[in-house]
Structure formats: structure tokens, C-alpha cells
Image (cartoon, rainbow, N blue to C red):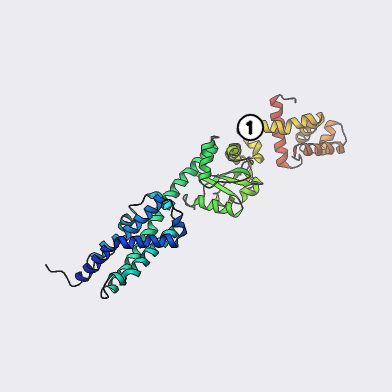
Amino acid sequence: MSSSPAAVPHSRAADALQRATGALSTAATARMDAEMPWFRDLSAQDRSWVGLIVQAGIRGFVDWFRADDGTPAPGANELAASVFGAAPRALAGVINLQQTVDLVRLSIEVVESDIDRLLGAEDVPLVRAAVLRYAREVAFATAEVYARAAEVRGAWDARLEALVVDAVLRAEADEAVLSRASALGWSAAGDVAVVLGAVPERTAAADLPEEVRRAARTAGLEALCAVQGDRLVVLLGGVADPRVAAESVVGLFGEGPVVVGPAADDLAGAHVSARAAVSAHRAAAGWPGAPRPVQSIELLPERALAGDGHARRHLVEQLYLPLLRARGTMVETLATYLDEGSSIEGTARALFVHPNTVRYRLRQVTDTTGFSPSRPRDAFVLRIALVLGRQSGRVE
């Protein structure tokens, strides 16, 4: 069977291009070295990989062009394998997408600039049109290579981030965990606080971490987060005030309580904040009117009633014992005031003192503990502290 008329110019031009493949690759590499500073900064091995990509691209174009004019351009998957298949996957982390686009554009310019020299005048328009078609497919293939690399890297980062968060919750934040956090870009200077809440129903789990990080960056904070079942755990870095920091991300949690633990010095000590936050989140149902977010220390009574030993000790050591040490009558006055239904006059009659004496002692309670017996919520906290203090048998 005789060749079609169109096959003759294709074959003639393809032969000329194939003979010039080496020269075109060398010219493209020389142009890159002269015009692209990033190329000169690459290691010798990476430069050789880039050279292989250029050669593969030019050879791929020649092989495709040699086919009949009706043959479609190779698909993105096929082209990515033929052009980028020779280079290691790690090269996508060395050369960014913009640099790869520059590389492709320069290689095309080199081929186009030499077409007039390499081919006869009758073949030039045909080859120029083919170069444009092939360049478009290379551009799509390039984008796909980097999209896949970003997808793999994103999935790996998500797993690594979940491991870091889980290690903090388990109080296992050793040097390896800190190194993993650093690999994720964590460089927070300042205190760290852990925020816990429900996962929102209408937000995809894959999109949630990025939304949290974006909100944290807007507030001048750093964030690591993970979805654990129906619970969203967020580690915030650069915290000055835990409640204020939690307010920057509270809108991304689902319905229900959002709890923030106390500030820790750094990521290695963040397990203390995590422990308090987990305990408070578990006990938060006991205070339906709690603010959102609520600090774990504000839920001390509920945590103590739920069996949290740390909360029990805090109430005894930070509230009951200071009252006991400050003045013996303060505990008696507080207990009587609470038993008398928060009545100043009733307390004064029960203690055989003037009402102003009761008021003075109650102000001393507030100054000593930071909780005012006249406020219902504070009175509840003080009541639990009194009960736990008496049960403890502590006298100093």
C-alpha cells in the first residue's frame, strides 16, 4: 500500500527533527543555564534529571509527529508517563510548578526557533502547528503531575498531623513528635492551648483542617488539628489568652460545647492543656449555660463530679486551703452563708455577728479565691470546693 500524500512531509520533517534531537536538547539546556538562575543552583544530579525531561519531551514530540496527521495528541496520562516518567517523583519537590512551566516554555521556544533552519519552507507551517498542539498537551500533563504530587503530599501531611495531635493527647510528645510538627511547618513561639469540640455536620472532614488553619493564621496563630471520630481537636500556638485564641476558631466546630484547656509553655507540654480540655469536654453537659468557648478551669465542679482527680485537687488546693489558711472564720462564714440561702442577715444571726462583718468576710473570700459567693455560679464552685476540702481531711 502506498503512503498517503500527507505522510511524505510528515516523515521528511520527522526525520529532520529526529536527527536534530540531541542538538535541540543541548541548546535547551544551554538556554536554561543562561536564563534560569534556579537551574544553575540545582545539584548536578537534579540538573541531569531536568535534561532527561527535556530530551524525553523532544523525542516524544518527534515520535508523535511521525504518525499520521489524523492521530490525536497523546492524553495527559500517557504524556506524563513518557515525558516525566524518567525523573524520580522527588524531583517534583525540588522544582516547583512555575519553574516547570518556564522549562517547558523555553524548550518549545528552542524548537520553534530552529524550525526554519532544520526544515524546508514547505514543512515549517505544519510543524509549527504541531508544536502548539503538543505544547498544550505538555502543559496539561505538567499540571497533572504536580496536582498528583500535591494530593499525595496533602494526604501524607494529614496523616502526619493526626499523629502529632494524637501524641499530644496521649502525653507522648517526644523529640520525634516535635520533629514531625516542625516538618508540618509548626514554628509557634509562645504558649500552646488545646481546643475540643464536635465536628460540624456540613463541612467535609478533608476541608476542615485547612479552614481551621486559615482562621488561626488570620488571628496570628498557628494550628494543628485532627478529626477523631465525632470530635475535632485543635492545637493553637502563639496563644496569649486561651479564651481569645479559641474564639478565632470556635465558629468551625459543630453544635455543642467547645472547650479550651489552659495555656502550656510549648508543644511538648501541651498534654497538660489536652488533659484538662478532654476532661472538661466530657463533663461540659453538666453546665448547659456555659459560654462558648468555655475554659476548662470554668468547669472544675463538673469535672470533679465526673471523677477528675486533677480538678478535685485544684479545688481543694487553690480554693479550700487558701481560705483555711487565711483566717479560720472565713470557711465558717462561707459555709453558713451558703446554708442560709445567701442571706447576709440570716448568716449574721446564725454567727451572732453584725451583717457588715459578714459582708467584710465575704469580700475576703472573693479576694482570696477569685470567686464571689454572691454570684450563683461562683457560689456553686465554692460549695463543691468546701465539700471536697472537708472530705480530704486537709488542714493546711
On the image, the x and y values in percent for residue 33 come to: 42, 59
The residue most toward the left is 1
| Quarter of the rendering containing residue 280 | top right
Residue corresponding to mark 1: 310
Residue 313 appears in view: yes
Tell me the kind of residue under disc 1: His
Query: On the picture, is 36 further left or further right than 389?
Result: left
Q: Residues within 10 Å of mark 1 (few under 14, many from 20)?
A: some
On the image, the x and y values in percent for residue 368 come to: 77, 36
| Residue 300 higher or lower than 58, as above or below | above
| Quarter of the rendering containing residue 3 | bottom left
Which quarter of the rendered picture does the C terminus lie within? top right
On the image, the x and y values in percent for residue 244 come to: 65, 49
Query: On the picture, is 263 further left or further right than 12?
Result: right
The residue most toward the bottom is 122
Query: On the picture, is 210 further left or further right than 306?
Result: left
| Quarter of the rendering containing residue 70 | bottom left
The residue most toward the right is 354
Q: Nearer the viewer, residue 316 or 270?
A: 270
Query: In percent of the image, x 30 and y 68: which residue is there?
Result: 130
Label 1 sits on a secondary structure element that is helix
**Total count of labels:** 1
